[in-house]
Image (tube, helix red, strand yellow):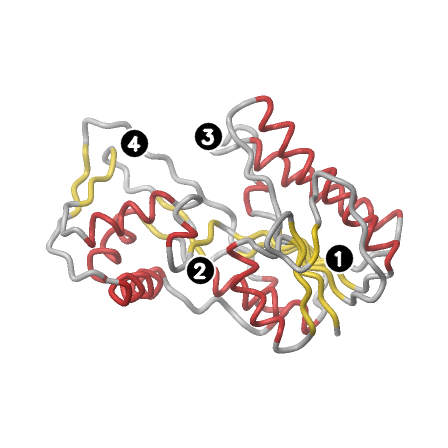
Amino acid sequence: MKILLVGGNSSLARSLRPLLAEIAEVVTAGRQGCDLTLDLAGDIHIAPGFDVVVNTAAHLGGNTAASLQAAEQVNVLGLLALCQACSAAGVGHLVQVSSIYATLAPSSPFYNAYALSKKHGDEAALLHTRLQPLPLTILRPSQFYGVGETYRRNQPFLYTLMDRAQAGQDIELWGGHDARRNFIHVQDVADLIARVVRTRTLGVFACSHPQDIRFSQIAQAALDAFGSTGRIRFLHDKPDTPDNLFAYDDALYRALGHYPQITIDRGMQMEAQHRRSRA
């Protein structure tokens, strides 16, 4: 089997590639640092011979009209062009890594250019499969994190908590509401993608951790992982932070016979061990 890993220099792709390499020849493609050059904002061509294409590339959007346009260009039109290139090349399976944010309602305070473009991209890819045959899997992970500085940009809240725990400082949470989130470790996401490829599981699936978690639980996990003497304090003079929750659906895990394995406690311990090894 031969796999094309698009967005091959992304943090997710770096965790995924070793797992795919156990079952296939893996060729990476991306704008830079990959075996092949491929830009979802440009012309896309895939040579014949790839059995599977896994797309981890995405535009993260932003808060401007220009960033909305760029997100739509990459996450919708770029994905659609990738689907067309896969069909033309006779690819046997496209795995599209989307986001749980694709299911957000416009009324959500977290609805943004990324969420909208991911929703549009999923719909465009599904419509393509009705027009041209292309076996498709769409995976929608919740917010994922991992070990090392690579993940700080996308999850600054988690890494700020760990920074304060490592420094022995108190962790301050805004408002009086103990907000809830869903985080899944990148190693779990990579493992699930590899299982989808191996089993050729098709469909549209949520990919979130089985347990939603409160900010205070995340903070306590960070304090415990670093052996910190800091405390958790709620700043009641600050605005409350709203929840950001999604309906839990374990259809993917039941289909694969496998569930995410890494808890937030274990994830924090992994980061603490990493930092200690580099000290």
**Labelled pair 3, 4 in contact (Cβ < 8 Å):** no
Residue at the spot of label 1: 136
For label 1, the crowd category at 10 Å Cα-Cα, with few meaning under 14, some 14 to 19 and many 20 or more, is many
Q: Nearer the viewer, residue 144 or 178?
A: 144
For label 4, the crowd category at 10 Å Cα-Cα, with few meaning under 14, some 14 to 19 and many 20 or more, is some
Q: Amino acid at mark 1?
A: Leu
Of labels 3 and 1, the one closer to you: 1
Q: Amino acid at mark 2?
A: His
Residue at the left extreme of this rendering: 229
For label 3, the crowd category at 10 Å Cα-Cα, with few meaning under 14, some 14 to 19 and many 20 or more, is few
Residue at the top extreme of this rendering: 65
Of labels 4 and 2, the one closer to you: 2
Q: Amino acid at mark 4?
A: Asp
Q: Residue at x 28, y 63 (%)?
A: 278
Mark 3 or 4 closer to N-term? Answer: 3
Left or right of residue 86: residue 277: left
Q: Quadrant of the C terminus?
A: bottom left
Q: Which mark is residue 240?
A: 4
Give residue 36's position: percent from left, percent from top.
70, 56
